[in-house]
Image (cartoon, helix red, strand yellow):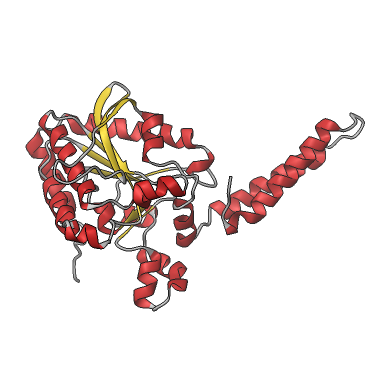
Amino acid sequence: MSFLDFEKPIVELENKLKDIKQMSEAGSKKINMAPEINKLEQKLQKMKEDVYKNLSAWQRVQIARHPHRPYTLDYIRMITTDFMELRGDRLFADDLALIGGFATIEGRRVMAMGHQKGRDTKENVMRNFGCAHPEGYRKAIRLMRLAGKFRVPIVVFIDTPGAYPGVGAEERGQAQAIAENLRDMLDIDSPIIATVIGEGGSGGALGIGVADKVLILQNAYYSVISPEGCASILWRSALKASEAAEALKLTGEDLVKFGIVDEIIPEPPGGAHRAPEQVAEALTKSIVKYIDELSVLPPEKLKDKRYNKYRSIGEFNEK
């Protein structure tokens, strides 16, 4: 398990504790290492609490990008059964950076979809580092319309630095594809529950994120631009990314205050990659709760509530 810079003291203490436990097990029974082990365990617990309860926005961004963090297919594997992937946008190609298909969550049939990153260089090239092309967004809305036709709830997992900004993507209408998704998702008859599981970057995230309920994992972020991009524009230097992260108010706590996100899904100390099954269990409970809550609403009322939710974002009163 790789670790981040600010986690180095924790990892060093964990390794020391592991070595002492091994020595205790392999050594003579006359040597009682229990007091030393207990002391180190208490010190480790306190250190974890001090570090993970006071994370900065930039540290949360780093955790959101951790290479071992669960991705969309990992959550689909953990919380659904009978996943059947559907491919292609029926216009140009199949985009492997954005996947989707029918699945079942605790007996409820859903359309599950989301951005997918790779675990190694070869897979990242294939998945384009989770940066979808126009065909990815056109595939997504095609699957959403299919789900809406049968009133099948839609479960979305958001995890992308942003939509792919390459020449080919622009030539094939990247901005138009995302804009059409923003418009058409407001008219889908099915409930839509979106969860930001890692990076929620710019229009690439919002292109599949217009939902009735938006959830976010505790160490994920959702922002109009990446901290590095913001720093490059405002300070002419990506080295100011930590300052930009604070200014962008991109953490779950800030987003709940602004009314952009509805619920924060807790993560274990260190992030979702430390106990993925635990996070998946908490996420499943929230998704099922909202599916049951929203599925009883008539389509027109559901769409009106979704429309008003997004129209109200950014409203303020002058005194």
Above or below: residue 9 compared with residue 19: below
Q: Residue furthest right?
A: 30
Locate residue 163, reporting x and y percent: 28, 56
In this view, the residue in front, 171 or 36, is 171
Residue at image position (81%, 42%) is 36
Mark yes or no: residue 33 visible: yes
Residue appearing at x 53%, y 57% in the figure: 54
Q: Residue furthest top?
A: 107
Q: Is residue 71 left or right of residue 294?
A: right
Q: From what the image shows, is residue 80 above or below residue 13?
A: above
**The C terminus appears in which quarter of the rendering?**
bottom left
**Residue ID at (20%, 48%):** 135
Considering every residue shown, the one lying at the far left of the view is 300
Residue plotted at (41% across, 49% down): 124
Q: Position of residue 7 (x, y in %)?
A: 60, 54
Locate residue 153, reporting x and y percent.
Answer: 21, 32
